[in-house]
Image (spheres, coloured by chain):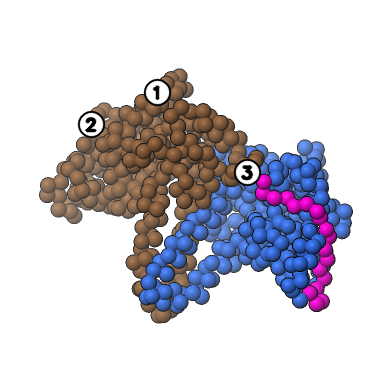
Chain colours: A blue, B brown
Amino acid sequence: MRIAVDAMGSDACPVPDVDGAVQAARQANDTIILVGDQAAIERELAKYDRQGLNLEIVHASQTVDMHDKPSQVARTKRDSSMMVGMNLVRDGKADAFVTAGNSGAALALATLSTLRRIRGVKRPALTQSFRVRGKEIVVTDMGANADARPEWLVQFAIMGSAYARCVLGTENPRVAVLSNGEEEGKGNALVKDTIGLLSRTPGMNFVGNVEPKELLAGAADVVVTDGFVGNIAIKSMEAVAETLFNLVRDELTANPLTMLAALILRPGLRRIYHQIDPFEIGGAPLLGVNGVVIIGHGRSNAKGIKNAIGQARKAVQGHLIDAIRQSTSGYGDDGA
Amino acid sequence: MRIAVDAMGSDACPVPDVDGAVQAARQANDTIILVGDQAAIERELAKYDRQGLNLEIVHASQTVDMHDKPSQVARTKRDSSMMVGMNLVRDGKADAFVTAGNSGAALALATLSTLRRIRGVKRPALTQSFRVRGKEIVVTDMGANADARPEWLVQFAIMGSAYARCVLGTENPRVAVLSNGEEEGKGNALVKDTIGLLSRTPGMNFVGNVEPKELLAGAADVVVTDGFVGNIAIKSMEAVAETLFNLVRDELTANPLTMLAALILRPGLRRIYHQIDPFEIGGAPLLGVNGVVIIGHGRSNAKGIKNAIGQARKAVQGHLIDAIRQSTSGYGDDGA
């Protein structure tokens, strides 16, 4: 297997990107292709013992940054590490691409300029998985489509189910719609229409709607939502977790006695932190394009990059793209 | 001042409802009118020393429960504590109404059958305030309008600002729209259209959009959103806070040593808990109807009821309804 990694993706690139790639190369026999400024990558690689590792470099003279407009990168930065890396996948020279760069640009490049949509897929969806009580659940869309239609959400459910089966090993994944309650009149128009469609979709293990609390309790394996709501929900969760952790840290470091207590509790608090650390999972797979693409957070550390590469590896091994092609074919062959 | 309280509102009614009312009556000289089953209220009141307290009872023979359909209560339960209590406000016999009952029913009764919309208000909004670094911020709509229009959100901003000024004492409140980022293409159609309108609204201290993280950091005093997104965001925050607290509690009670640490940290953890305890604030004011209505969570405890009554008191003292009437008049006089 050959996995291309954007060496110029993260906010602190190429440091965590190269570090994570080296760690991933140590984990398995796959070839990791670092894409980006050759000199910068070589300088960074020189820090590591590369003995026995399958690491390659593909030079790209440009870098997409956070200020680049997603709609323009395909024209203005044709030799960016992001575009070059995706084209490696498109041309069969790599099996997957991992980037922690500008996610809007990655979405636009993957969807419109390089890999493009799988035939029949109306809109690709950015997908996130969480670990809940030792089990991963999938939330999709996470931000690719701020305004969505019910039929798109049905496809997100189909693609998210394929991810749960092929990558996470979940049999017959339970699908739910994220909503604000189960009482009469709850849910917005999109949710209500989507529930109507999902309950009539053949082969769909649809279990109804879930509130955020039930989502976190693992009431479903795949939770669908539009990209705006999904993004707000996940960012709300992250913001509270971070705020609470900061408050707890302040209390733990308040005086010598609380610092002693902190010492006692360190292993337990670390266990909790691992459960909510987004970099334990890696990145967000973009489902619905002709190739495995994992988009990590700009703040990704080396662990985040390493785990995103691990996700890409599992997606290739699990034949995710074939599964999505099969499960979405016939659903909407108009390509619209 | 006379505040009517639904004695049959909370899930555990009338216990916390009456307890909270008694506590509120002890705090100030106002009259608290308990509305509901007279015998049940009297039985509950007998537990307390009522000396010097201004407590009255208004009998209502019916109770709205969680299974009642909001659209039908006005017809099927005309003598419910909720409807009777709201009518006290409508008829000038009380200055405000507090309930921890079925919120959908409370919305429907207030908006369509009893107090009704303030002239010019397109849609009333359920409003929540949070305490962030010692300062309260207002989020509206929290769930009254799952599908909203940009003009409605502008009114939510106007009404939320009136609440921040009159009830929380915030001068020239900063208004923001809840969104998923500031980069190009972020926000859904509703958010983009609302931003356009808000930036042109005279007298509006509009500061742009905020992500959930900035909301929690206090980047704005009033944050507007549609009722679906607002509800999902707040429920996501609550769900994570609860999950984390449970995880921390499990670690604290893991063994005798961690229990010792827990003992040391108890005051600090209690401080944190107070910051996120929704019942510290009270309930959610329904803005846009002809009277002060505070809707508490069904799980409200006595403290939640007491604080909701305190909110009602401040809203009356701050002349909230007059302020909303003034600030929304002229905005949309069609009454549509």
Q: How many residues crowd around disc 2 within 10 Å: few (fewer than 14), some, or many (20 or more)?
A: some
Task: Please tell me which residue lies in front, B98 or A258.
Answer: A258
Q: How many residues crowd around disc 3 within 10 Å: few (fewer than 14), some, or many (20 or more)?
A: few
Check disc 2 and give the amino acid type: Lys
Percent position (x, y) of residue B248? 45, 67
Residue stretch rendered in magenta on the structure: A50-67
Look at mark 3 in the image and give the residue it sits on.
B183
Ranked by sequence position, the earlier of labels 3 and 1 is 3
Element marked by disc 1: loop
Q: Chain of mark 3?
A: B
Look at mark 1 in the image and give the residue it sits on.
B329
**Label 2 in the same subunit as label 1:** yes
Ranked by sequence position, the earlier of labels 2 and 1 is 2
Q: Is residue B38 left or right of residue B281?
A: left
**Residue for point 73% across, 65% down:** A18
Look at mark 2 in the image and give the residue it sits on.
B93
Which image quadrant is residue A137 in?
bottom right
**Label 3 in the same subunit as label 1:** yes
CA–CA distance in space, label 2 to label 1: 25 Å
CA–CA distance in space, label 3 to label 1: 35 Å
Check disc 3 and give the amino acid type: Glu
Q: Nearer the viewer, mark 2 or mark 3?
A: 3
Ranked by sequence position, the earlier of labels 2 and 3 is 2
**Residue for point 36% across, 58% down:** B274
Q: Are marks 3 and 1 in contact (CB under 8 Å)?
A: no
* Vertical position of residue A58 compared to residue A270: above or below: above
Single out the residue that lies furthest toward the top: B334
Percent position (x, y) of residue B79? 30, 35
Single out the residue that lies furthest toward the left: B51
Q: Is residue A70 left or right of residue A329?
A: left
Find out whether residue A57 is within the magenta segment: yes
Percent position (x, y) of residue B134? 36, 52
